[in-house]
Image: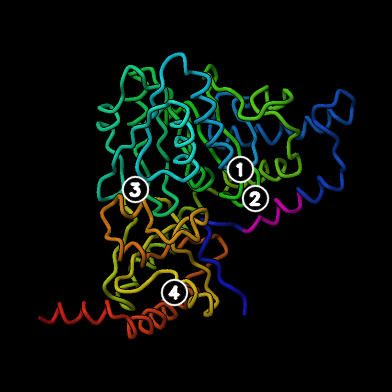
Amino acid sequence: MKVINFDHISSNQILPEVQEAMIAAIREGYHNPSSQHTAGEKALEALEQARTAVAALINAGESKEVIFASGGTESVNHAIKGVAQANADKGNHIIISNIEHNAVIRSVKRLKSQGFNVTSVSVDESGRVNPDDIAKAITDKTILVSIMHSNNETGTLQPIAEIARVVKSRNVIFHTDAVDSVGMLPIDVQALGVDLLSFAANGFYGPTGVGGLYIRRGTRVWPLLEGGVQEHNKRAGTENLIGIIGTGVAAQAARRDMQKRIQYLSGLRNKLVADLPGYIDDYIINTNLEHCLPHLLSVSVKYIEGESVVLMLDDENFAVSTRSACATGSLRASHVLLSIGLSHADAQGTLVIAFGVENSEAEVDRFLVALKRVVTSLRNISPLYQRGNLAASA
């Protein structure tokens, strides 16, 4: 039986039109875009068409503000380390939040070993950063603030435009990790007021292993990779032209179908939220439903362990996750869920359900039936559940 993918935050299927464009590009046999001859110029034209499509998706002021990379992780590393190195003469202080992706956390950890200071601001119980906390954390040594646009575990959105106003009033560079937002929600870098924005193609049904960084004109950033002068001298190395061509087509499709996708995906998520009480009890919704991605829901099911649920649902032919795929294998509770106030036990019982455009309401119904069966089975052997029932009846 076909596996039903409810783990679209980890991976999306490449759209048919994107596949066709990439196959056609392979058959075309494009040359190196940096070559000076006619074949190279043709490749460069295809590269710039894709860049223009991505720039239009995020409303960049000019296409050359978009720099292609190998994915979201490289993009985030480039933004944080590149800004730190380029602006070290101005200060050594960086601000992030407690719920950032490991690409941010580990980048600043590396910079701390090089003498940089890092402040991590807390989020409230709904998972959002208070712009006033950013204002209080900024010092005369602050050179960078990096706050994610949407969280990859809860789907909760941050007040990026409000934070940007605070940051820019202090003449500090502002980066946002929008890897899970670009292509899923309307993203306008002008309205957001950010200086740098990270994205990844697989987030909007493009190929895995392609992403990039928006760098507002005039922002001081050093290259992460040294070598040639590709990507307007911002990222060395021959571009992944086939993947970038696919990314351009995916960006065009995302821009074209944005509102239709949002309406459909949020409908599936809202159905799950509305119907869930009829199947299981004792759970916590971790997603801020007022400010969130349209397709993602984080649910902590009490008294059981999330990885067991994932494995048993896999036997039922449903793919879901417990946390970010990048953190899979860690025995520790999610730092994101602990930051919004969950206990270790409740955090360990978390499911992340992320819908895609190929999913249906009938699949949601089937999922709920399977989830009830799995949760009931696990709770029947859970000492935590037995103690919880005894406490409730006392």
Q: Is residue 19 magenta?
A: yes
Describe the element under mark 4 as helix, strand or loop: helix
Callout 1 crowding tier (Cα within 10 Å): few <14, some 14–19, many ≥20: many
Q: Quadrant of residue 194?
A: top left
**According to the image, label 2 marks what residue?**
208
Left or right, 157 with respect to 57, comes to: left
In front: 346, or 277?
Answer: 346
**According to the image, label 3 marks what residue?**
291
The image shows residue 67, relative to residue 149, as above or below, that is above
Q: N-terminal of the two: label 1 or label 2?
A: 1
**According to the image, label 1 marks what residue?**
71
**Label for residue 34?**
none
User: What segment carries the magenta color?
Assistant: 13-21
Q: N-terminal of the two: label 1 or label 4?
A: 1
Relative image position of residue 346 (x, y in whole percent): 30, 65
Describe the element under mark 1 as helix, strand or loop: loop
Left or right, 318 with respect to 252, comes to: left
